[in-house]
Image (spheres, rainbow, N blue to C red):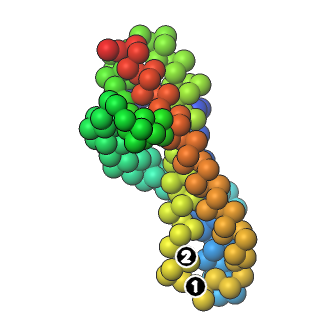
Amino acid sequence: MEGFSFRPQPLLAHWAPGAILTSIAAFYVVDSRGVRWFWRLSSGLNTTLLIVLFALASFGLGLILDAIRDRILEDFFDAVGSRLPQRGRFGAILRALGFKKVNWEFFVCGDPRILENFETWFYSHYMLGFDLGLGLVLIVLPWWRILPDATPRVPVAFSLALVSAGALLLYDVLRLRSHVADITNKYVP
């Protein structure tokens, strides 16, 4: 597996969104029956095993969020960015919001020193923020439409705070994506 590394930044960028979303999902789903079911399950299991299962589930959810970002949203942003007119106010606003074509060859053909610095200090934060923002929006919005009466203990203010945090993260990530496009296009023309 040449080219794959277990550096902490990419691993954290995959695991943290899954861990946070798994915890939030448990908060939304838990009711009196869910608590009893969880305690029955956990009473027969070792605490270490529960932690390992939580970590694996979190990493798996983080990978799913990353795949959605990587295969669907990045392709969408690149497609829109490559079709934007070079002049005009609308195109300028969308380009400022991250609708620029990223030169993905930078990750293969770029200078290794610049690439390592870029991935460690910039791109991992982009992945983390994007996956977490996407997950927050995806986990909170369905609960309002699908199960409005099933979660009476979840305060509306908490849900609004999560949606606001997700929207803020996604806005920040779109701005970061604009910088990612600028950097990747600068070093690999």
Characterize the local packing of mark 2: few (<14), some (14-19) or many (20 or more) Cα atoms within 10 angstroms: some
Residue 116 on image: x %, y %: 50, 18
> 26 above or below 5?
below
* Image quadrant where one finds the N terminus: top left
The vertical placement of 168 against 138, above or below, is above
Where on the picture, by quarter, is residue 99?
A: top left
The label shown at residue 37 is none
Question: Residue at horizontal 64%, vertical 83%?
Answer: 151
Q: How many marks?
A: 2
Residue found at x 65% / y 78%: 30
For disc 2, the marked residue is 143
Q: Secondary structure at mark 1?
A: loop
Residue 73 in sight from this viewpoint:
yes
Q: Nearer the viewer, residue 9 or 74?
A: 74
Say whether marks 1 and 2 touch (CB < 8 Å). Answer: yes
Name the image quarter holding the C terminus.
Answer: top left
User: Residue 127: horizontal and vertical position, in percent?
Assistant: 51, 39
Residue drawn 59% across and 55% down? 166
Q: Which residue is mark 1?
A: 148
Which secondary structure lies at badge 2?
Answer: helix
Q: Earlier in the sequence, mark 1 or mark 2?
A: 2
Quadrant of the rendered structure where residue 50 is? bottom right
- Residue 31 position (above or below residue 54): below
Q: Position of residue 122 (x, y in %)?
A: 56, 27
